[in-house]
Image (tube, rainbow, N blue to C red):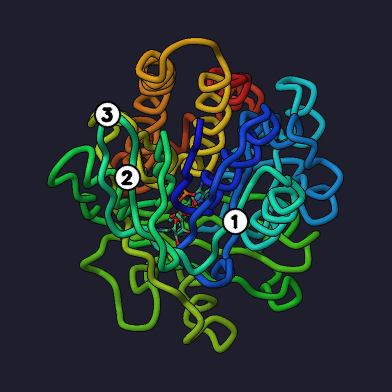
Amino acid sequence: MRVAVIGAGISGLTFALSLARKGFELDLFERAETLEEVGAGIQLSPNASRLLLALGLGEELRRCVVAPDKLQIGNGQRLNLLAALPLGEWAQARYGAPYWLVHRADLQDVLLKAVRKEASVRLHLGAGVEAFDAQESGVAFEAAGKENHADLVVGADGLRSVVRRKLVSGAEPSPSTHVAWRVSIDVAAAPDWLDTSCTTLWMGPGWHVVHYPIRRGERLNIVAIEPQKATGPSGPVLFHAASEIATFFASETLREKWLPWPLQTVDPSLAWAKGRAVLLGDAAHAMLPTAAQGGAMGIEDAATLSAELARDGALAGQLARYELARKPRVRKVVSMAESNLQIYTMPSLVAGLRNTALLALPGEVLMRRQDWLYSFTA
Ligand SMILES: Cc1cc2nc3c(=O)[nH]c(=O)nc-3n(C[C@H](O)[C@H](O)[C@H](O)COP(=O)(O)OP(=O)(O)OC[C@H]3O[C@@H](n4cnc5c(N)ncnc54)[C@H](O)[C@@H]3O)c2cc1C
């Protein structure tokens, strides 16, 4: 089978590698001339790290990741901690795989190097696929100035997927009410109150902040999420109530460095496969970042789709089984991300109850609520 993968982000690269390891030849088309990621981090939970380890990327990844020992949750207005959920060895023992923090560029680099080593993957950079013609007999499309043919087109082309638009007409992403501001700094530039060794979530009325170390602990990744309408021209504006966070966010260290990222989502219940085309990753189900799972779901999709394609049987059945296997889990993760946003940004009136519950419950009990998500093997 001739497989054409469109998009070399986390999902497309993982899929290309997974399929090549199963003995397939494929073409990977990427619009960008060079693969670069903006300076931001990504949390890789055990459900994702176990799949990357199974692809043999452990040694390379361990050189650039941080394995934090905990996830802290705090009241962002008073800067007092409410809970510490165990990660590190506890997560490794419970889920059989590590919880990692990594710079996106490092992850992409590890995946790209592994893909380049596969003789059966032809990587085409600077090769955008803007339209394709899918017939029963095959798919034809132009890329890199020439006509290409495939038996299957895999759309790993992200939020604005060309493949999704072809599968479901008018399937545009929906803008969220919130925007994420992202920045990364040297850990040495962080103020004393900020723990640079692990993931910390600060919650405030209408906003929240997550920060964690990347690049072997040399850099700190910070994401601040607030309503779109509150956004100022050069950084988050909602933090006046939390004086120390506000002072730090407006300080020389961060000013002018914030990158706004308006959040958008794709309804995961739309079709993911039709005829000779199939979607994975953000192209199928871009979600809010409040479960830290968008990339992980793309990695899981890649494992499931490659396994289905390697099974005997007709293409229609393979694609149908992939969609059936993935959709319920992705929908559950999407609703978790939506309810997390509500919980993290609760107004002060009800936030007291949330904070009391967090203070009362042991960290392990809170972490076990993620068992269904982290112990899963796609
Ligand atoms: C603030 C924030 C924090 C996040 N934190 C986490 C986290 O901690 N953990 C986690 O798992 N996820 C996280 N995510 C989600 C994660 O970043 C995404 O889900 C993931 O990067 C999607 O990868 P993808 O490969 O599916 O799509 P993309 O990264 O969008 O890649 C698509 C690729 O396709 C290419 N392309 C697009 N169109 C074409 C075309 N027509 N022809 C050829 N190539 C094309 C693009 O150039 C790109 O390289 C976060 C997201 C945000 C916004």
Density class for disc 3 (Cα within 10 Å; few <14, some 14-19, many ≥20) is: few
Residue at the spot 61% in from the left edge and 63% down from the top edge: 221
Q: Is residue 354 left or right of residue 254?
A: left
Q: Residue under circle 3?
A: 136
Amino acid bearing label 2: Met
> In this picture, is 265 found above or below 373?
below
Q: Which quadrant, please, contains the C terminus? A: top right
Question: Quick check: can you spot residue 352?
Answer: no
User: In this figure, which residue is indicated by the disc labeled 1?
Assistant: 123
Q: Residue at x 67, y 73 (%)?
A: 191
Q: Residue at x 52, y 46 (%)?
A: 12
Q: Position of residue 292 (x, y in %)?
A: 51, 43
The residue tagged 2 is 346
Of residues 244 and 69, the one drawn nearer to the viewer in this rendering: 69
245 relative to 324, above or below: below
The amino acid type found where label 1 is placed reads: Leu
Q: Label 3 vs label 2: CA separation?
A: 51 Å
Q: Nearer the viewer, residue 29 or 136?
A: 136
Give the percent coordinates (x, y) of residue 203. Answer: 45, 51
- The quadrant in which residue 281 appears is top left
> As displayed, is residue 243 above or below residue 54?
below
